Amino acid sequence: MTLLSDLDTSFGQNALQLDAIETQFKNAVAGREWEHEWSQCFSSTRKEFLNLRSILKERDDGNYQLAFSSLRGVLENLLFFRLFIEGKKYYSYQKINILPKVNPNPQARDITFTKWKNEFEIWQKTKDQKFKNYKDIIGMRLIGTDSIEITRVLEGLYDSKDVAQTGEWIPFYYFLFGEYNPVTGFVSNLPSVIEGDFFPDIAHTNAGKQKEIYRRYFTFNAMIKHWMLNNFIDKSQESRIRVHYNFLSLFVHPNVFQNEYCRLKYDSLLRKEVLEYESDNTMKVLISLYCVKIQETFLSTLANRMCAISGGNWVELLLLDLKTNSAVADILWFVFDPPTDFDIRRSESINLQKGLNKNASLIYYSNPLQRLRSMGIH
């Protein structure tokens, strides 16, 4: 058995876990009315498994650039997916225009801001119930010449009848998914497109709203920010995600690394390059490692959330099987995994060279491909 075949076996075994999760969940919620969002959770996971399986086919065909660039898309979908089913907390932004109706005062906005800021600081220090309307606020700032933006951290969303917010909740990103329209945001108000719109003013307004949703919630940085807010990751794990996102992005945007990592095969008889990449086993292994680890994270996220919704305790053995099946890919030292012996020794060596205690810090790598080559995986 080779490492590649072991990784393929792991991927296949984990794929079966999706049906096991669905069966356990259906048994646990038997008798309850089936919710549409539950179906969406399973459908979204299946779609990403199909994408991962297609990426493995690209690996087998030697299409390394396409495989890695596709992995970036799946990684972004993973960031969204966890917020979509498990993101209880979210940032809420409110823009308030200060426009006095009587005797307009150009300083009205600044005066109001100072007043609110002072009251906010009193609430933070004393929790005086007179200022309890500030309890969800985490910050405020001036915008333009007449506006104040209030930033809150909210939870839910809960049923309107659940005033105490102790019952079931639906993630904010679940509703955002239905609201966000990138066509409206980035296409509808283009000069040659908006000419066909009978209400261009409305089109411009809607485009601005959609761009704001994208910037606040759907960019990579926005989703990472919400992962941090929900305590899905700590600062070191955030760095790991950024390392992998940056590496996979190398195969999406033009840069010199594409020529270095994806070399065209040279046919000595024809004396020219052909439409085929040079075979690279390390690249194949890295693609497989990503597929197994991303698949594992999708499944663990789905299983934990479905178990929480059902109120059962059926998830522990399933997660143990999942972890066991995925252990072959632990050499990647992905987001939630412990470091390998190789990484520990590397960190100790660097710390000693810097004149520090060998255990001073645990150093993450910056390039997954170069690291695998350094580990002797060729």
Image (tube, rainbow, N blue to C red):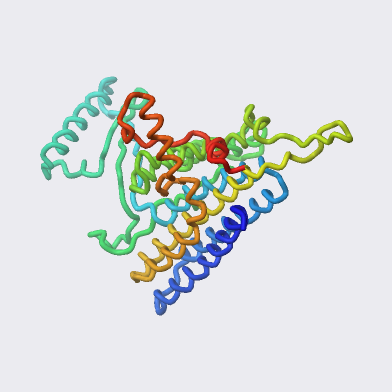
Q: Observer-nearest residue: 291 or 265?
A: 265
Q: Is residue 51 in view from this perspective?
A: no
Q: Is residue 145 above or below residue 152?
A: above
Residue 258 x, y percent position in the rendering: 65, 32
- View extreme (bottom): residue: 31
Describe residue 124's horizontal placement relative to residue 105 as left or right. left
Q: Residue at x 44, y 45 (%)?
A: 340
Q: Observer-nearest residue: 268 or 24?
A: 268
- View extreme (top): residue: 106
Q: Residue at x 12, y 45 (%)?
A: 129
* Residue 377 in which image quadrant: top right
Q: Residue at x 58, y 57 (%)?
A: 6
Q: Is residue 84 above or below residue 42?
A: above
Q: Is residue 270 in view from this perspective?
A: yes
Q: Observer-nearest residue: 339 or 118?
A: 339
Quadrant of the frame with the C terminus: top right
Residue 364 x, y percent position in the rendering: 43, 36
Describe residue 59's horizontal placement relative to residue 325 as left or right. right
Residue 65 x, y percent position in the rendering: 66, 40
Q: Residue at x 50, y 37 (%)?
A: 211
Quadrant of the frame with the N terminus: bottom right
Q: Is residue 356 above or below residue 31?
A: above
Residue 148 x, y percent position in the rendering: 31, 31
User: In the rendered picture of this protein, how many numbered marks are placed on residues?
Assistant: 0
Describe residue 65's horizontal placement relative to residue 289 as left or right. right
Q: Is residue 310 above or below residue 340?
A: below
